[in-house]
Image: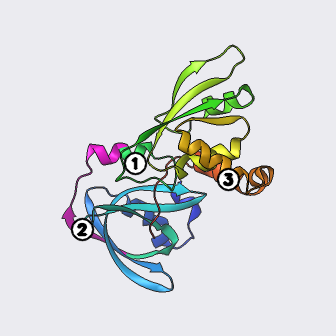
Amino acid sequence: PHSLLLKSKRQKINRPRVLHKRENQVGFKYEYENKKIAVVTNPLKIVCFYGFWYLLGLDSEINKVKKYYLNSISSIEIKDKRFRVSQELQESLDNAINIWFQPDVEPFKVKLHIKPQIAKYIKRRPLSKTQIIESVYSDGSFDMSVKITNYNEILRIVLYWLPDMKVLEPIELGEMIKERIGVIDVDRVREKGECYFYASMHMCGDKLSPTL
């Protein structure tokens, strides 16, 4: 599916397959701020953020996961050096909700109340693999929890679903939502921005954290 988003050049069509070779490091040129940067990374997976495809790679020197926009990658070279992905890192990648994920942060629990108006949508397409329904009420609403590593992972999702999604815990996140409501037009966000954010984030499947 990744190749559908690339141009007809042979190298671009083959690029996702090459970059997704998990046992070997890869090197490539990366266009960033009108410069070509030489990159060597441990390729982890190809993911979709907001409708755009990225390579997630582990910079082994600083032990940090970075993302690279596929169409900015060129001159790919498979290196001889091999690597392994730890189970802990793989689980972190799999549980990431979106671009704001921080793999070096211990996941923490967020508890949400879901009103019956949107209950079927949240059940049909869970926000995360960590999603657990904890309490179900007679009106069809329910309480659920997910694990996140950054408030921004869930904040925009709650803003999109207001007033049918409410933060129960932690209180600090609930206060952040209230502050945001005071400075944004929620209906406009739904119509213009966050609808695209939510749809692309979930329809594309995988996700992760910003760097390049």
Name the secondary structure under disc 3.
Answer: helix
Q: Nearer the viewer, mark 1 or mark 3?
A: 3
Q: CA distance from mark 2 to mark 3?
A: 37 Å
Q: CA distance from mark 1 to mark 3?
A: 28 Å
Give the percent coordinates (x, y) of residue 1. Answer: 53, 53
Residue 93 image label: 1
Q: Amino acid at mark 1?
A: Leu
Give the percent coordinates (x, y) of residue 131. Answer: 50, 32
Dot placed on the residue nearer the N-terminal end, 1 or 3: 1
Q: Amino acid at mark 3?
A: Arg
Q: Nearer the viewer, mark 2 or mark 3?
A: 3
Dot placed on the residue nearer the N-terminal end, 2 or 3: 2
Where does label 3 land, which residue? 180
Asked if the magenta segment contains residue 104, the reply would be no
Give the percent coordinates (x, y) of residue 190. Answer: 75, 50
Q: Nearer the viewer, residue 83 or 160?
A: 160
Q: Quadrant of residue 6?
A: bottom right
Where does label 2 land, which residue? 61
Q: Amino acid at mark 2?
A: Glu
Tell me the magenta residue range. 76-91
